[in-house]
Image (cartoon, rainbow, N blue to C red):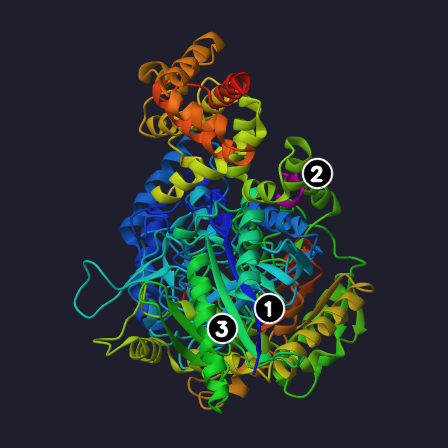
């Protein structure tokens, strides 16, 4: 039987506020355990939450970015459960009245088609701390690090609109692109800034009734998400085809060991006993605030893509890749405007640089080759000072900290020979010293002659130590050979 | 000196009739002499108090000190005090020393008030008799075989027993007014949002409100002047100017329309209490106030609604006491589950556990709508009753509680009988309205309280009426036997 996969995502996005959602403690990543947790974060008796306005604004910005209804009155509720990394014994979150209502996110697929994924809602909440099971701890005990406790999150809940892993990944990447483009999240997946819960079910192709779903929680990379869905889809199909039924359950996937396992079934699920938090007033957002945020909203990925096509004459695909996140986009734009050749700028940004960054595990923001440096090099390709091949050497040197393109070109003597007199001499010399090749060329038919051109080119480039401008050489060579015919 | 009111102490301090150190020493001496009898104070901060008194005397010597500078007070042990154990009457927090002051404590400290110590209370403010305290029951100075009321029983008994001229307290369903009534003193629960809840250990966040206890309405006004403030650390605190509550005390009450709710004089009201309250109403009428019978038709729903909402909020508020971060942790837990279970079973007393269970049940899937949802609807109705009433009257007056102080253990095995203690006080918490209690008579040698309920933020008018009542009566000047 053919099976259809149905996927819905719940995405936790850490908001890039300086301080926590309900306290003035810092949200910066990587501090010593419990050094960024104040009395409120520790849930000391008598302490009270005060809502961070910036977090509310960021959530609204997300809502505007996906063209969602904004909850003009949203309400924080308490979600009650006991866990050592949850200091109050409840998470302050939103349920009945979230800040962001229904919206939609468009995704582009590899075949060029687009699809709209509906967003059910997005709500504001606080992150929990972390349990620590390794390190210098007394025997048999675990530690708790509450630095992360109270970090503002939005949880984005999609409808089960995705039908393949490709769609799910495209959706996740699109959300990443949106939240980083509007600057509400730093997008650092490795630091947990975006985490995915995937709801997966399968059903016979052509049917409409949803199958029983499972939820795999807390995946913190696109790759792990992809793997987890793949494994879960396989598992569910195996179970059903073996005559079994799927249990509604929460599952975990370990990206390092590649092992997926069930955590708890629906029956074992907590009764969270939500109720409105009496320490916080309903959040009322005025139309003025919404409009001010709308006006200040940075360019969205889709708009940027369209602009790149229009302004820089890029293909839709290239524009899509380059506009996917704010730092890539701004890097590309600097290169393009400074070098004056957007097409070459796009090729180098997406090609050599992107590959090198990937290998080094770096983002565009941390690139060892600055946008200005790359622009300087691309400009030299554009004005024929260096060939593409030379540029690779220049790029390598810049990556290693060798300075700007012009300095490297000078130091390595990489300057391309474009003087037509000099090139003509090289071509003539090569033709003179290879009479058999010339003879052979003259005696060949039209089709074979084209192939034989390469032989001459190789000799000429060798004679010029690779510095001859290939386009010019090609032109001179053809002219000379034609004269001989 | 201990028979002086706070107003008199302020005058004496400002005129250098006595120093703050002398006053502080006097009250500390009284605490060490009489506290064994009352068990009203659970932590005495003698050294700290004397240091604060010296500082206050220096400020007084320089002139222009705030009104309350040098006055000694006790704080209910529900208010966090920096560096001083804050137990909330519970074993759970027997070892808890907060690194911060409650805003109420901070306001008094800034004003130069001297903290003598912390008062006993029902555990986590859950109780109407002070019998649920981990530190043992407080005795009523008027009859030491009787309860002082609760949960602010320690503060009430301390003021009645002249261990302090005034004390801070909190009121979630009557916890200021009922013990004030039972101990023959004056106590005021302000409008919800008038006084900051920062640093006040939460019982039921939407109902909790701090207020003053003293012997006179005039003193309550002085204390409230300092207690009330806008505080951006409490999101439910209302940003509204604090009037000078002392300024309007002497206004005439002539023509004031006083609503008398017929539902507050029904079955269950002790005849002695009823007689005393009716006499007080007649006194007010004689002063020119106009009595108007009113109806608060949903009054009978207030106790059931309260005993859903308050435990529901409490069940979440008390989840933080889990043995992980501070406070009590059971010995040698086997695992996490064991640590949670034993920490909370051993650290909380029976009444607290009962309310956590009630609250958890009311919020459970399948019961939420029937209990919590319905209780919130009732709360709206009760609020509306008062809104309607205040369209017609300026203040509402009736009994504070159904009967005078009862004997220890007499309601111990019947929680519902205990809950009915707050039948007249709970509605104001549900509506968020201010209420106060002033002494208005004696029954069987024990005090009776008169409750005055005001419209939102109308504390000044309540204090005005109470003060005027105290100009023509002397119930507030009477002292328990043995106090001279």
Q: Nearer the viewer, mark 2 or mark 3?
A: 3
Q: CA distance from mark 2 to mark 3?
A: 37 Å
Helix, strand or loop status at disc 1: loop
Residue drawn at point x = 70 percent, y = 78 percent: B299
The answer to whether residue A214 is visible is: yes
Q: Would you call the spot at circle 1 few (<14 residues within 10 Å), some (14-19), or many (20 or more)?
A: some
Q: Which mark is residue A215?
A: 3
Q: SS class of the residue under badge 2?
A: helix
Which of B446 and A19 lies nearest the eye of the viewer?
Answer: A19
Check disc 2 and report the residue beneath it: A295
Dots 3 and 1 on the same chain: yes
- Label 3 – label 1 distance at C-alpha: 16 Å
Question: What segment is highlighted magenta in the picture?
Answer: A296-304
**Residue drawn where x is 54% and y is 87% of the image:** B417
x then y, percent, for residue B32: 29, 62
Q: Residue B17, percent across and down?
A: 42, 41
Which mark's residue is nearer the viewer, 3 or 1? 1
Q: Which quarter of the rendering shows the N terminus of chain A?
A: bottom right
Q: Mark 3 or mark 1, which has the lower sequence index?
A: 1
Q: Who comes first in sequence, dot 2 or dot 3?
A: 3
Q: Secondary structure at mark 3?
A: strand
The mark found on residue A163 in the picture is 1
**Left or right placement of residue A336 versus residue A430 in this view:** right
């Amino acid at each position: 039987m053919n099976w259809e996969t149905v996927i819905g995502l719940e995405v936790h996005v850490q908001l890039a506020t300086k301080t926590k959602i309900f306290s003035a403690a810092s949200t910066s990543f990587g501090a010593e355990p419990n050094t960024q947790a104040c009395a409120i974060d520790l849930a000391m008796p008598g302490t009270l939450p005060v809502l961070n306005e910036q977090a509310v604004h960021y959530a609204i910005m997300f809502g505007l970015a996906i063209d969602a209804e904004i909850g003009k009155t949203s309400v924080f509720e308490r979600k009650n459960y006991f866990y050592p990394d949850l200091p109050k014994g409840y998470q302050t979150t939103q349920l009945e009245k979230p800040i962001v209502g229904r919206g939609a996110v468009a995704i582009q697929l590899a075949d060029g088609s687009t699809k709209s994924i509906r967003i059910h809602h997005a709500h504001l909440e606080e992150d929990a701390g972390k349990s620590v099971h390794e390190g210098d701890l007394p025997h048999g005990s675990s530690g708790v690090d509450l630095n992360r406790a109270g970090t503002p999150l939005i949880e984005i809940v999609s409808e089960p609109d995705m039908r393949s892993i490709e769609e799910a990944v495209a959706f996740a990447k699109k959300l990443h692109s949106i939240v980083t483009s509007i600057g509400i999240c730093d997008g650092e997946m490795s630091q947990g800034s975006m985490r995915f819960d995937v709801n997966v079910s399968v059903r016979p192709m052509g049917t409409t009734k949803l199958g029983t779903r499972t939820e795999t929680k807390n995946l913190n990379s696109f790759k792990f998400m992809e793997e987890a869905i793949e494994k879960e889809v396989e598992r569910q199909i195996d179970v059903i085809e073996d005559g079994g039924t799927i249990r509604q359950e929460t599952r975990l996937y370990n990206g390092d060991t590649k092992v997926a396992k069930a955590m708890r079934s629906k029956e074992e699920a907590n009764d969270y006993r939500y109720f409105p938090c009496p320490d916080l007033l309903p959040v009322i957002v005025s139309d003025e605030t919404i409009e001010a945020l709308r006006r200040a909203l940075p360019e969205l990925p889709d708009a940027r893509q369209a602009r790149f096509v229009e302004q820089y004459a890029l293909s839709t695909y290239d524009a899509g890749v380059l506009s996917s996140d704010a730092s890539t986009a701004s890097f590309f734009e600097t290169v393009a405007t400074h070098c004056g050749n957007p097409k070459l700028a796009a090729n180098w940004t997406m090609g050599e640089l992107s590959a090198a960054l990937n290998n080094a595990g770096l983002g565009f923001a941390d690139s060892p080759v600055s946008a200005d440096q790359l622009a300087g090099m691309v400009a030299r390709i554009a004005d024929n000072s260096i060939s593409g091949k030379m540029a690779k050497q220049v790029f390598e040197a810049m990556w290693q900290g060798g300075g700007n393109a012009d300095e490297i070109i000078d130091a390595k003597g990489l300057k391309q020979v474009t003087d037509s007199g000099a090139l003509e001499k090289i071509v003539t010399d090569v033709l003179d010293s290879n009479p058999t090749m010339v003879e052979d060329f003259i005696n060949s038919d039209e089709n074979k002659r084209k192939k034989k051109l390469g032989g001459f080119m190789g000799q000429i480039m060798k004679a010029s130590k690779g510095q001859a401008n290939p386009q010019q050489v090609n032109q001179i060579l053809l002219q000379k050979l034609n004269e001989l015919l | 000196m201990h028979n002086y009111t706070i107003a008199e102490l302020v005058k004496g301090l400002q005129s250098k009739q006595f120093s703050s150190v002398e006053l502080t020493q006097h009250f500390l001496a009284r605490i060490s002499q009489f506290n064994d009898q009352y068990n009203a104070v659970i932590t005495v901060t003698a050294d700290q108090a004397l240091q604060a008194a010296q500082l206050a005397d220096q400020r007084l010597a320089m002139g222009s000190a705030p009104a309350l500078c040098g006055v000694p007070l006790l704080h209910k042990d529900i208010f966090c005090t920096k560096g001083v154990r804050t137990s909330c009457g519970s074993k759970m927090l027997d070892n808890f020393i907060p690194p911060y002051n409650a805003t109420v404590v901070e306001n008094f400290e800034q004003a130069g008030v001297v903290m003598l110590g912390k008062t006993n209370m029902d555990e986590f403010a859950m109780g109407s008799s002070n019998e649920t305290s981990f530190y043992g029951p407080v005795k009523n100075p008027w009859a030491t075989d009787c309860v002082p009321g609760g949960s602010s029983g320690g503060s009430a008994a301390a003021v009645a027993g002249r261990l302090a001229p005034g004390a801070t307290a909190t009121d979630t369903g009557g916890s200021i007014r009922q013990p004030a009534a039972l101990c023959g003193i004056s106590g005021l629960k302000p409008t919800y949002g008038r006084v900051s809840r920062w640093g006040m250990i939460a019982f039921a966040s939407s109902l909790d409100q701090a207020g003053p206890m003293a012997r006179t309405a005039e003193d309550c006004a002085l204390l409230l002047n300092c207690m009330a403030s806008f505080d951006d650390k409490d999101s439910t605190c209302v940003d509204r100017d604090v009037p000078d509550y002392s300024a309007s005390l002497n206004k005439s009450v002539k023509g004031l329309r006083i609503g008398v709710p017929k539902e507050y004089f029904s079955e269950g009201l002790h005849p002695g209490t009823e007689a005393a309250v009716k006499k007080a109403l007649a006194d007010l009428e004689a002063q020119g106030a106009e009595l108007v019978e009113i109806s608060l038709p949903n009054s009978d729903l207030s106790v059931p609604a309260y005993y859903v909402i308050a435990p529901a909020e409490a069940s979440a508020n008390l989840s933080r006491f889990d043995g992980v971060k501070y406070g009590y942790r059971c010995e040698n837990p086997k695992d996490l589950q064991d640590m949670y279970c034993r920490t909370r079973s051993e650290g909380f007393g029976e009444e607290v556990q009962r309310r956590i269970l009630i609250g958890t049940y009311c919020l459970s899937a399948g019961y939420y709508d029937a209990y919590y949802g319905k209780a919130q609807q009732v709360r709206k109705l009760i609020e509306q009753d008062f809104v309607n009433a205040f369209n017609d009257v300026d203040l509402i007056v009736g009994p504070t509680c159904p009967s005078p102080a009862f004997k220890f253990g007499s309601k111990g095995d019947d929680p519902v009988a205990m809950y009915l203690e707050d039948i007249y006080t709970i509605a104001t918490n549900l509506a968020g309205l201010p209420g106060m209690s002033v002494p208005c008579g004696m029954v069987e040698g024990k005090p009776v309280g008169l409750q005055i309920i005001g419209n939102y933020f109308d504390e000044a008018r309540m204090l005005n009426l109470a003060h005027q009542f105290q100009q023509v009566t002397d119930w507030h000047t009477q002292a328990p036997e043995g106090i001279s």
